[in-house]
Amino acid sequence: MEATRTLLYSEIKETLSSLNITVFDNRLKRTNKESVEVDVEKATVTVFDDDTETKFILSDVELVPLSCRGLKLSPFSEVNFTMQIDSSSWKTVKPLKFESKQSYQEEMVEKIQLYQDKCFCAKCDQKISRNHCFYKRVLPLPSENWSSSVDMWFCHKHGNDDTDYKSLSLIPKSGECFVGTSYLLVRSTHLLVRDSHNGTVTCPSCHIEIGAKFVERNKLNEINSYTDNPVYKIFSESVQFHRDDNLYWNESPIQNKEAFFAKMINEQSHAYTSFRLILSGEKENKKIQCLIWLIDPNLLIFEGEASSEKKEVKLKPLSVMKILYKCDISDTSRLKTGRSTVFDQWASDNSVHGFHLPYILCSSLITCLIKNTKQLPKSHRCLNSFLVGILHYNR
């Protein structure tokens, strides 16, 4: 006989003081599903039949048991219903507002200025910066589309200056660090990393990819890779800056990758007042595009799973970002068909904000989203031809 598996997923609707609850139980697939019951009390949701009982204990909220509405059994062995939350208990629950006075870029600039050569791999905590190699200047990079407005910065040419500013890249000199929205630009003399033949930069200890060699192309499509002193593009979520004394290790815990992506999407949405974003990344002949439709930047959820061995599960509210997304991975060497797609429609829409990410970051974001989508109940995974995804701020 198949082992009993029970999942609970619920979303707190703050304005309505309600809790949308979905319970999955594989016993509902069987012909005797009428014997399975779901019982709701003030702080518990219990699923039981004649033989077993599974209890989910919800912390920080109290339900009104007689307020059940919208009860239905989906074909995916799921029971969906909505419960009212006691308003007096609701006051103690607040979503995690992931908004600070500083942007992630500004916070990173301050950290680098403070800790300088105390740069470590976020996965294995191996130091990857050279000792006593300090930065004279740490500067934030402008937005990615800065060159499109460069004509407005100059009213005329100065002397014999024929520089095409639109084609210029902002490259740090030795002793400088430039900080973008998702990466750092530094010279190779500052870092102790492995530079592979294909342009990737990896941690010397755990060999995880933490960046790439920066390559610049001029008007004639000629490549300048600064072979004497290469420039590295280091992914912000792959490194951390903190004191190298173990006593202070807790000051800078390893960054949560989902929280990094959630905050980045939130900042881009606020900065450009757009709830629809196009993320793109390219590598050789591969191109990733991901459409992001921000539904709720600060949503509280309960999620948990019980098994035959674990009959009682205590759940705490988790703060997440809820989005709709659609991904496309294409081969740029092939000719594109003339058929218009939703990707083309979004790209031509001025209300949609687009920004570029390193290929590996784009791929990592999609991996996180797909993994979390698979953990949602089946009835919650799709909406209007888009996939539903969540990114956790806290665990």
Image (spheres, grey):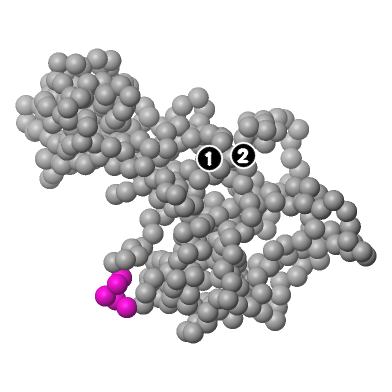
* Gap between marks 1 and 2 measured at Cα: 8 Å
Which residue occupies 44% across, 73% down? 115
Type of amino acid at the residue the image marks with label 2: His
Q: Position of residue 167 (x, y in %)?
A: 79, 58
Q: Are marks 1 and 2 in contact (CB under 8 Å)?
A: yes
Q: Which residue is mark 1?
A: 269
Q: Is residue 378 left or right of residue 91?
A: right
- Residue range corresponding to the magenta coloring: 245-249
Q: Position of residue 276 (x, y in %)?
A: 56, 35
Q: Earlier in the sequence, mark 1 or mark 2?
A: 1
Please provide percent x and percent y for residue 289: 60, 44
Looking at the picture, tell me which residue is in the foreground, 127 or 38: 127
Count of numbered badges drawn on the protein: 2
**Label 1 secondary element:** helix
Could one spot residue 383 in this view of the protein? yes
Crowd tier of the residue under label 1, counting other residues whose Cα lies within 10 Å: few below 14, some 14–19, many 20 or above: some
Q: Is residue 348 above or below residue 207?
A: above
**Main secondary structure found in the magenta portion:** helix
Q: Residue visible at 31% across and 27% down?
A: 13
Residue at image position (31%, 66%) is: 251
How many residues crowd mark 2 within 10 Å: few (<14), some (14–19), many (20+)?
Answer: many
- Give me the disc on residue 353: 2
* Circle 2 SS class: strand
